[in-house]
Amino acid sequence: MGGQDYAENIHYSVFNSKYLSRLLIEVGFRSVRRWDPQKVDHHDFEDWASCTIVVNGGNYPVSLNIEAGK
């Protein structure tokens, strides 16, 4: 995770949708949902949110795109 090509380029936590959604609910968020960067008005630029990687012949998103409302 991360290129790890300099000291600050590292991730210390990994989240999946179920776990992150539960954490958000526990701290008071509601209406937690995933969003597709290709299908929302507020994401009209290229970044890691819209990138995918190929693993064992399958195409997987790089980012876990979740939004939550209070």
Image (tube, rainbow, N blue to C red):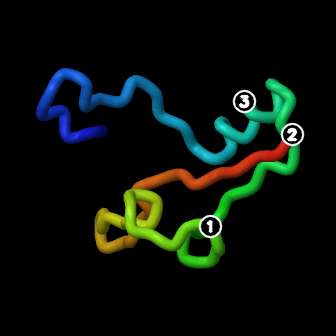
Q: Amino acid at mark 2?
A: Lys
Q: Position of residue 30 (x, y in %)?
A: 87, 42
Relative to 49, does residue 19 appear above or below in the rendering? above
Q: Earlier in the sequence, mark 1 or mark 3?
A: 3
Q: Which residue is mark 1?
A: 42
Marks 3 and 1: in contact by CB < 8 Å?
Answer: no
Residue to which mark 2 is pinned: 70
> Residue at the spot x=64%, y=47% of the render?
17
Q: Which mark is residue 23?
A: 3
The residue nearer to you, when weighing 12 against 19, is 12
Q: Residue at x 25, y 31 (%)?
A: 9
**Position of residue 68 in the picture relative to residue 15 (left or right):** right
Q: Nearer the viewer, residue 56 or 9?
A: 9
Q: Is residue 14 left or right of residue 46?
A: right
As rendered, which of 41 and 33 lies closer to the eye? Answer: 41
Q: In terms of image quadrants, where is residue 25?
A: top right
Position of residue 51 relative to residue 21, above or below, is: below
